[in-house]
């Protein structure tokens, strides 16, 4: 490990890029059309996942994890005045990415991808630093 570190010669500035401050608040404006679209697509995704018998039988633990995470995000978006990047990533982006990868062009994969795109559009408006990192 020391040999690899010596060869790479990492510098402090090598670690300065990455996700935005995970605790930077992202305000929620429930009247914003981009937020409303994202919220609707998240609801559709949750309904599709919860109703998928194939997902429940082929990967029940993963399905339960994805449903729990997305439900946490949905509930926070409905009740909080602001959320944080880490919440969106942990409870939204990560589980949706699991679905998009596993199901691709199947219905659940398409819904997951649409929800990710809606999140990205909403984040473009409210969290410039987050979307710059997310898009890279």
Image: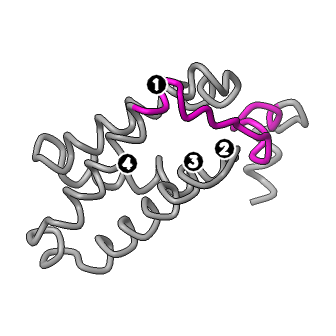
Q: Which mark's residue is nearer the viewer, 3 or 1? A: 1
Residue furthest to the right: 12
Q: Quadrant of the N terminus?
A: bottom right
**Circles 3 and 2 in contact, beta carbons < 8 Å:** yes
The image quarter containing residue 27 is top right
Q: In this figure, which residue is indicated by the disc labeled 1? A: 34
Residue neighbourhood size for the residue with mark 4, other residues' Cα within 10 Å, grouped as few (<14), some (14–19), many (≥20):
some
Q: Which residue is mark 4?
A: 97
The residue under label 2 is 85
* In this view, 94 is above or below 33: below
- Across and down, in percent, residue 80 comes to 66, 52
In this rendering, position of residue 24 left or right of residue 88: right
Residue 57 percent across, percent down from the top left: 13, 79
Nearest the viewer among 36 and 64 is 36
| Image: 29 above or below 44 | above
The residue carrying mark 3 is 88
Decide: is 116 above or below 58. Answer: above
Disc 1 secondary structure class: helix
């Amino acid at each position: 490990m020391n040999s690899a570190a010596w060869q790479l010669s990492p510098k402090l500035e090598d670690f300065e890029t990455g996700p935005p401050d995970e605790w930077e608040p992202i305000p929620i404006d429930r009247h914003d059309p981009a937020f409303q679209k994202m919220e609707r697509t998240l609801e559709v995704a949750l309904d599709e996942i919860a109703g998928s018998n194939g997902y429940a039988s082929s990967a029940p633990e993963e399905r339960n994890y994805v449903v729990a995470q997305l439900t946490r995000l949905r509930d926070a978006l409905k009740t909080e005045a602001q959320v944080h990047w880490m919440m969106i990533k942990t409870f939204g982006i990560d589980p949706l990415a699991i679905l998009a990868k596993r199901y691709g062009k199947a219905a659940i994969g398409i819904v997951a991808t649409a929800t990710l795109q809606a999140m990205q559009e909403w984040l473009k408006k409210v969290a410039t630093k987050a979307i710059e990192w997310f898009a890279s």
